[in-house]
Amino acid sequence: MKKLFSLLFVALLAMSAWADTTVTFIPGTTTGNNSAANAADEMTLDGVTISGNKAALAASTYRFAAGSKATVSSSVGNIKKVEFTCEGSYSQSYGPDQFYGDGYTCQSGSHVGTWTGDAASFSLNTASQVRCTKIVVTIAEETVDELVAPEFHPNGGEFTGSLAVTLTCATENAEIFYFEGEPDGDWAGFERYDGEFYVTETKTYTAYSSKGGEISDYVTVTFTKVQPTVEAPVFTPAAGTFVDRIEVTLACATPGATIYYSLDNELWSQYIDPIPVTDDITIWAKAKVGDVESEVVSASYIKVIDTVDVTFDGAVDKGDGDNTRHHFTVVKDPVTMYVGDGLVHDSGHYRIYGPNDSSAFVFTSAGAPIIKIEFNGMSGYTASNLSLAEGNDGNWTTGGNDGTWEGYANEVAFNVNKQARFETIIVTVAAGEAPLLGDVNKDGSVNIADVTALIDYLLNDASAAPVEADVNQDGIVNVADLTDLIDLMLSNPVEP
């Protein structure tokens, strides 16, 4: 009986056409890829795509650069209206009057500009930069006569912050009702849907449509709020050595993140342009979206005065290797290449076998540290068959037949995961004066005075410690470096 009275009440309400769909774009919730408006970018939600030839759709506000074009297109029905809510109002910076094009209007004093029409796609030009805090697209969906269930937009799922939810029904002149929770036969607490509502915590909603005294099937969705996370920034190039000058760039995979960097792990600046590096330096970085921050990461860069290339040529540099499978060593001052299981083939290439108990592939430098190793691989036996052995630092990349290791070490060891063959291997070592790791007080030797100096930095200001204090070369000066410094002294005792 309660259900019957509810349906009679529904029939007395004014009938409205709910066939139109609204798709709402919110910065930080639906995003593109760019955080700066200097290249093409786009984003898609529920069949609607917004793009710009110079746009930043992953920024804290949607940004369209001056003199660019913004395009809205739909694959789910013609666009009837688009409302652009802007950061500035009419005649202010970033306001809606900076858009112009057919079908577009905005009023003095308003933050909102509106396009109206009937098209699958349209474009607006920008006189100056426009920044939008919300874009609402209204789509005319095809209507049907029979009563069908409504649809949630979005159709449940995870979200962060707050989420705008809309409901539509393809049945012309049908009304929509919804309530919180699962359907249980009790209609108490249902609401007549009259526009978007916001979800701010995990909720389950049930909806149905009604027309002419009939009701549709139930539709139930759950919106799950998740704790937002922010990816740590990535350094390009990675930590390592350089000659003369480099520019370090930072990027974050989390859409809409703002990146910050520091040269002392205390004073932070927003990252905008590449960071020029001309001397030994450690850079710290973190990313932030709203109040959520990523972990702090760092990269150390060491300047080398000059470099020397040492080339191992399988046709010339055989060492004690021959065409019989065994372990062998090739020495080219100051670098030694050791192969645990392999041979130097008569056709002029090195073969490295593995994996097995004897397989090993190690490069050591008796003097200046190794900063790069370039492998010229062969088809079917490429450098991708190698991987860095545990405990080795540096950046290992492969492509095609070849591979490159870059870092800063006197020994570099590789795992042999499958047979590899190389015609030439070029090892680049740092020449000139390089930092003496462990020489914290920079007196030219490593001794107990350096331990005292490192302890002083750790107790007072580790960020002020010199590059020589980063003994384990992980980019951070901490107690692990003190342990390694003591180990270094015990293995190579020097009187103070």
Image (cartoon, rainbow, N blue to C red):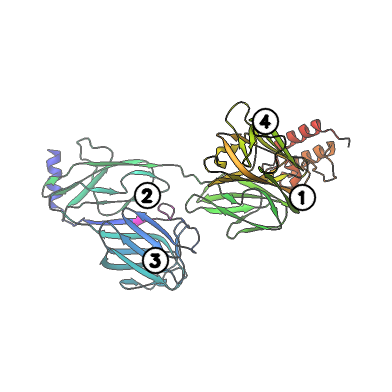
Q: Mark 3 or mark 4, which is nearer to you?
A: 4
Q: Which residue is mark 2?
A: 163
Residue type at tag 2: Leu
CB-based contact (under 8 Å), mark 2 and mark 3: no
Residue located beneath label 3 in the image: 70
Furthest residue in direction top, as rendered: 357
Q: Residue at x 80, y 30 (%)?
A: 490
* Quarter residue 457 falls in: top right
**Of helix, strand and loop, which one carries label 3?**
strand
- Residue 109 visible, this angle: no
Sort mark 4 into few (<14), some (14-19) or many (20+) by Cα contacts within 10 Å. Answer: many
Residue carrying label 1: 431
Provide the residue designation for mark 4. Answer: 327
Secondary structure type for disc 4? strand
Q: Which amino acid, mark 1?
A: Ala
Q: Is residue 25 magenta?
A: yes
**In the rendered view, would you say 273 is above or below 333?**
below
Q: Which residues are magenta?
A: 24-31
Determine the residue positioned at 59% across, 50% down: 235
Mark 2 and mark 4: span between their CA atoms?
64 Å
